[in-house]
Image (cartoon, rainbow, N blue to C red):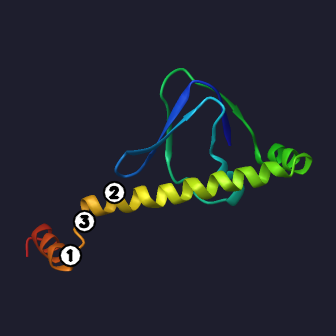
Amino acid sequence: MFVVLDGSVRVTIEPSGQEVAVTPAGGFFGEMSMLTGAPRTATVRAVDDVRVLEIGAAAFTQLAKAEPRLLDHVTTVISSRQAGLDQARAAAVAAVLPLEPQSLLARMRKYLKM
């Protein structure tokens, strides 16, 4: 995971490239993959000059053992971010695909030239 020491980063989701967050100095990213083994769920790019601190899994484990509230805090942030990512993904899909089955069928027929 990475802690933003200076600058800020923009978090987007693919394939839409929709911005879901800007993380300023003091914030962090990359924790979800590190702690759960799940594949990354977003793309993070620097907004301006950025300096980050990388914290590996072993170092994070030592920190969490020394300060158990750290894991509680990170879990709260992950839960909140996941809910926001889920909403952003749903909105992106809704913007691309109509919800009515007949409209979806018509789009597929048109695409397949049927």
Mark 3 falls on what kind of element?
loop
Q: Which quadrant is home to the C terminus?
A: bottom left
Q: Which residue is mark 3?
A: 97
Residue 84, image x, y percentages: 49, 55
Residue flagged by tag 2: what amino acid is it? Ala
Q: Residue at x 86, y 52 (%)?
A: 68
- Above or below 71: residue 43: above
**In the rendered picture of this protein, how many numbered marks are placed on residues?**
3
Residue flagged by tag 1: what amino acid is it? Glu
For marks 3 and 2, the one nearer the N-term is 2
Q: Which residue is mark 2?
A: 92
- Above or below 47: residue 62: below
Q: Which residue is mark 1?
A: 100
Mark 2 falls on what kind of element?
helix
Farthest right residue in view:
66
| Camera-nearest label, 1 or 3 | 1
For this view, does 10 lie left or right of residue 28? Answer: left
Q: Are marks 3 and 2 in contact (CB under 8 Å)?
A: no
Residue 73, image x, y percentages: 73, 50
For the residue pair 70 and 36, the one nearer the viewer reads as: 70
Measure the C-alpha gap from mark 1 to mark 2: 16 Å
Residue 32, image x, y percentages: 64, 53
Q: Residue at x 56, y 53 (%)?
A: 81
For this view, does 55 lie left or right of residue 14? Answer: right
Q: Residue at x 67, y 55 (%)?
A: 76
Measure the C-alpha gap from mark 1 to mark 3: 9 Å
**Dot 1: within a 10 Å radius of its alpha carbon, few (fewer than 14), some, or many (20 or more) residues?**
few
Mark 1 falls on what kind of element?
loop
Disc ID at residue 35: none
Residue flagged by tag 3: what amino acid is it? Leu
Q: Which quadrant is home to the N terminus?
A: top right
